[in-house]
Amino acid sequence: MAGGLANKASTDKVLMKGNEAIAEAAIRGGCRFFFGYPITPQNEIPEYMSRRLPEVGGVYLQAESEVAAINMVYGAAAAGARVMTSSSSPGISLKQEGLSYIAACELPCVVVNMMRGGPGLGGIQPSQSDYFQATKGGGHGDYHLIVFGPASVQEAADITCEAFSIADYYRNPVMILGDGALGQMMEPVEFRPVEEPELPPKTWATTGARGRRPNIITSLELEPALLEELNRRLAAKYEKIKRELVRFDTYKLEDAHWAIVAYGMMARVARAAVDKARARGIRAGLFRPISLFPFPYDSLARVAEQVRAFLTVEMSMGQMVEDVKLAVLGKRPVHFYGRTGGVVPTAQEILQALERIIQNEAPQNANGAWQKEGDAGAEGFWATGGFN
Amino acid sequence: MLEEVIIAGFGGQGVMVMGYLLAYAAMREGKNVSWIPSYGPEMRGGTANCSVVISRDSEVASPIVSEPTTLIAMNRPSLDKFERMLVPGGLLVVNASLVDREPERRDIDILKVPANDIANELGNMRVANMVVLGAFVARRGCVEPASVIGSLEKVLPPHHHDLIPLNEEAFARGAGLASLRPSMQP
Amino acid sequence: MQKVFGRPEALTEAPTHYCPGCTHGIVHRILAEVIDELGVRERTVGVVPVGCAVFAYYYFNCDMIEASHGRAPAVATGVKRVLPGNVVFSYQGDGDLASIGTAEIVHAAARGENITVIFINNAIYGMTGGQMAPTTLPGQKTTTSPSGRDTARAGYPIRVCEMLSTLDGASYIARVSCTSPANVARAKRAVKRAFEVQLSGSGFSLVEFLSSCPTNWGMTPIDALRWIDEKMSAYYPLGEYKVPEGARQGA
């Protein structure tokens, strides 16, 4: 389990934007190839890479489109390189086909999505509305990315650095799922020495069939039985990932009666809401998934044994809340509060949502239905959850 | 101690670097800090703002400031846009050289700094931002003046390091305009 | 006894799935012979398209990657940037290269990406069953232009060699066919020159093959080759469109 949110600063730290810290961390994690296409709010990543990669003998290339960029990633990963691309929501949509191929061919790479408000062209302010796309596959076919949702510049840097060895180890694309605010904000960050795990050589890479049989990288399989075999192999890998890669963090959850569940930037605000609630004598706590695929279902299920209800808070109309409900399996009510389009819920709004739950938490509400309540004072989308 | 500052003005007034300096100074002091700019098309429109959150005791929650404890308004549009967002008892620092109206709020601490006039006296209009920063830091005490001065060489690009003495002087002139009156906020 | 004809080392022993009379097989052989003659098989990486050549990775005896539809130049770019000392080629049809992958081919050429592209232009979508291609000739009947391509509604064919030749990044561009032994010999010289251009680091090279599709054209193989000579070559003239300074002329 990773540590807490932003760490105490000291003079050996540097003040960096999240986007820049991710780029620097990628280079420290061994990334030497970057293919991208400009889109706000992640442009600092390609800009930083274009400056820094040549200094370390790497290659930065601005592709003609996000579609081309992800396919360049596919080629570079096939050739055995540590490679990354980054984009923001609409651009990530364009990369989905390529990601499906990369996942099917079991090629390692790292993809950063600094989410902005959607759907469509949407806006450029922070959002978390690509959770479904990121964690449930995104493109066509039965596949998963490994997805992490860092909540601070430090955590974004740490996870990005590690992401390359995780991708290599599992031969799977890894997505860093941030948002516009995480990318744009500056916080103190410290680049820690990288510990590389023992990794098998990439004997599968298409580097030229020198003294060996040719390697073929393809996801085409017209024989149903063989294609099913691929899917079974992938599924087995995802099960292994679920056993080995779950990460989460908690805050004041030990004695909590009310659990707030939030990830990324939203979790920082939720943490402040926990403090506000505690100041009013409400025993609130925070559960913060760090790995979004694999999602910490089991750990959250254990929290259900202890708390009276859950409040999931997101910068979306309610996406991760579905995984929270899957984890809780009807044992406790799961409520939701969200803002969208680039609006970030404040700690005060979260506190109000929590107080309303506490007031209303009565058996007659537990009818399994979701209701939208147009309650004055709450601008966000508000839903009470029953025991479904 | 929790200081949530919005710094706003025209592009070119140095509002981003004010925030950057403040954040850097806070980091040097081991405080929790975040800085975030407004980004996107509004950057091209000639106005700019950034938010800085400094917290001594706890980690920074959201870097996005919706209820600032301090507003630094370098021009009139910034005052118009952000004044109502200030928390009661918060601090408003206005660049009195450019802002041609009185603040409407009566429940806040107001510090009027003729920043451009002082910068003119110093011979370089571009240090108006440092005059204002000096006044703000002297008023709130959220970071030590020495931390800000010590951050100049980290924050300013090397080809501007010859201007560090002038920046220090501007900062001191601003600081001389304000006495310490820490937040009225709990 | 002297062996005068054999399978190139750069081809596997797998039987191809191409239709009788299709010229893909000839193009494969030309490519394989060039790879052998240049001695680069063990450092060659090929990228194949979505289209009739989708299984070409079974036929070439070198490292191969299957790309998504139209993206082979981008995939080849990724490989080449990682392995600049390797020989990287893409093998693409007209739908793949001139329709869905237009952006990728234009920008790979514009960047002067040091790869070689083998472009099979048979004026039709073969694998999907004979639909209209971006290179389908005006008036040509396909399953989606049953009365013949009407340029008023469906626009005009794209002349890829002419278009790419305008780009400074393109180093070697040629159009060839396999309709006669002489044309096959010329085609092989063009492919070899394209690979040599890549080996010398001179930038982007592309060889377009006017290729036959007897099945979807509804012709005998012989008639199909005649149609290339009479109809296709009239719209798409053969020849070298761009040759780097100092390279030999006369394919």
Image (tube, coloured by chain):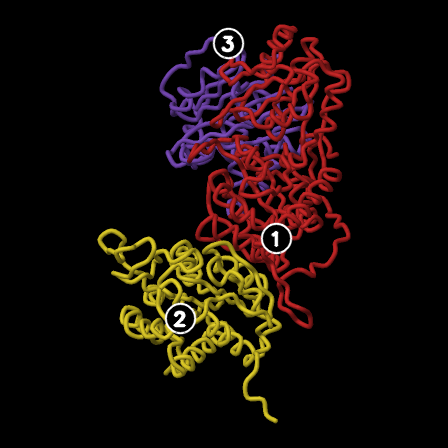
Q: The N terminus of chain A is located in which quarter?
A: top right
As drawn, B159 above or below A248: below
Q: Left or right: A276 with respect to B45? A: right
SS of the residue at dot 3?
Answer: loop
| Residue at which label 1 appears | A105
Q: Mark 3 or 1 closer to N-term?
A: 1
Q: Quadrant of residue B53?
A: top right
| Residue at which label 3 appears | A375
Picture coordinates of residue C43, whole percent (x, y): 60, 71
Q: Residues within 10 Å of mark 2 (few under 14, many from 20)?
A: many
| Residue at which label 2 appears | C209
Look at discs 2 and 3 and give the one toward the viewer: 2
Look at discs 3 and 1 and give the one toward the viewer: 1
Q: Mark 1 belongs to which amino acid? A: Cys
Q: Quadrant of residue B8?
A: top left
Q: Residues within 10 Å of mark 3 (few under 14, many from 20)?
A: few
Give the colour in which the image draws chain C. Answer: yellow
Give the colour in which the image draws chain B. Answer: purple
For the question of whether residue A8 can be seen, the reply is no
Residue at point 51%, 37% (across, down):
B166
For the question of whether residue A256 can be seen, the reply is yes
